[in-house]
Image (cartoon, rainbow, N blue to C red):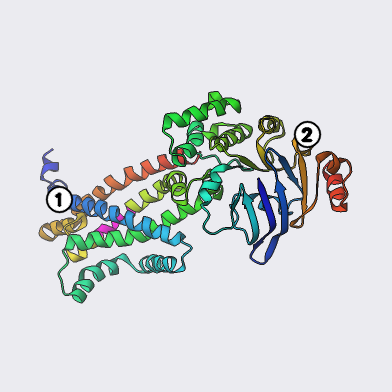
Amino acid sequence: MEFITESHYYRVMPFLLEGLVWTLLITFVGLLFGFILGAVFGFARLSKNKLIYGIATVYVEAVRGTPILAQILFIYFGLSDLMDVNIDKITASIIAIAINAGAYIAEIVRGAVYSIDKGQEEAGRSIGLTRGQTMRYIIWPQAFRRMIPPLGNQFVISLKDTSLFSVIAVGELLYMGQQYYGMTFQAFQALTMVCIMYLIITVPTAVYLRRVERRLDV
Amino acid sequence: MISVKDLHKSFGSNEVLKGIDAEIKEKEVVCVIGPSGSGKSTFLRCLNLLEEVTSGDVIIQGDNLTDPKININKIRSRVGMVFQHFNLFPHKTVLDNITIGPIKVKKMSKSEAEKVARPLLEKVGLSDKADAYPESLSGGQKQRVAIARSLAMEPSIMLFDEPTSALDPELVGDVLAVMKELAREGMTMVVVTHEMGFAREVGDRVLFMDEGIIMEEDKPENIFGNPQNPRTKEFLSKVL
């Protein structure tokens, strides 16, 4: 017991728990907005209107084709520079996750809606439902079920991506670990615990998703 | 009741319907037969605008479907459609499949809609399946639910697009029995089918389609007993 309480594995924990709070906050709030962006741009990508489709495609491809590290630096330093304002680090991080995940979620939404058999829409329309009603009551509930596994996957990816915000000194999990070994030179112990903290979130998520997936493809 | 005038339909450069003229009277059961690729399903789907009409007129109870100002949702609620692959809503129970139309389109309450749905389920012989999900049903049961779902909107016309083609042979009979019952009650029906027995027995008139036009139309006994058009003869000799 003495060994454990004395060890850096233990002493790093208050730092990491504080970091974890920020990591989770940025992930959840960022993904909430990311989901809204994803839904909007996902539907835009299904639009027959060439302009709407084009705008959404540019967004999706621009985000997917650039590294998230460049995106966060662009938002935090680039936009601050351009608009001559200081964006708060946490806000910048949330925006970065939202914009980045939004592009991937847009593809998840598009793919899921597209995957629903055309006959479902025809059946809905043939009993007199409007396009909107057919989407809301027939297509979307089925598409949303198919979106759960890839959305969970995106949650894990975005959670890990928040570690990149250490470059702008956001006090998230990895950054707090770095702070700790910066003071104590115990990099191995600190980083071991950092990784364990990530795994405590990501592994159960992955296990849960696998179960959902199995239940979905009967 | 339904009047089709010089109906053309193209998919890109491929003209599938090359000028269809047809009149369907109230309470009439019209069966459409013909080889695959003849345009018979496309013709049927034009009758509730699931396919956009390229040119020509489709007039249902006085409403011209090709009028851009027409409220197609209103018309579709009067024209029921049954699909080859049933297209039941898999995330809804059998009862919810049937009530969603009355609830969302006719703005009925849930209990009102159920009062419509339950007798229909009984009519198609599936009262005990109200709370089941479609995946637990056989093909024939699914198709009967799909018929009930259409009937819940109290349509004045029913369109059937090869309703038994996706069914195992032993399940066809139950679906045809429901359709016969509907015909007997006086429903106006347009049925695209490969069931020549059904066409002969239940149809008031048979349209033979090939290459995007109606090649021959007549009473079933004449079409099957004494076809005039050589294409009709050739087709019937292959399927009968």
Q: Quick check: A214 above or below A14? A: above
Q: Is residue B151 left or right of residue B36?
A: left
Q: Magenta segment, which residues? A: A156-163
User: Dot 1 lies on which element?
Assistant: helix
Q: Is residue B176 magenta?
A: no
Q: Check the residue under mark 2 and report the chain it is in.
A: B
Residue for point 18% across, 50% down:
A21
Q: Give me the disc on residue A18.
A: 1
Q: Position of residue B40 (x, y in %)?
A: 71, 51
Residue for point 28% across, 55% down:
A33
Q: Looking at numbered disc 2 in the image, what kind of residue is underneath it?
A: Glu
Q: Residue furthest top?
A: B128
Is residue A197 visible from the viewing direction of this image? yes
Residue B28, quarter of picture: top right
How many marks the image carries: the answer is 2
User: Dot 2 lies on which element?
Assistant: helix
Q: Position of residue B107 (x, y in %)?
A: 43, 39
Which residue matches tag 2? Answer: B201
Q: Residues within 10 Å of mark 2 (few under 14, many from 20)?
A: few
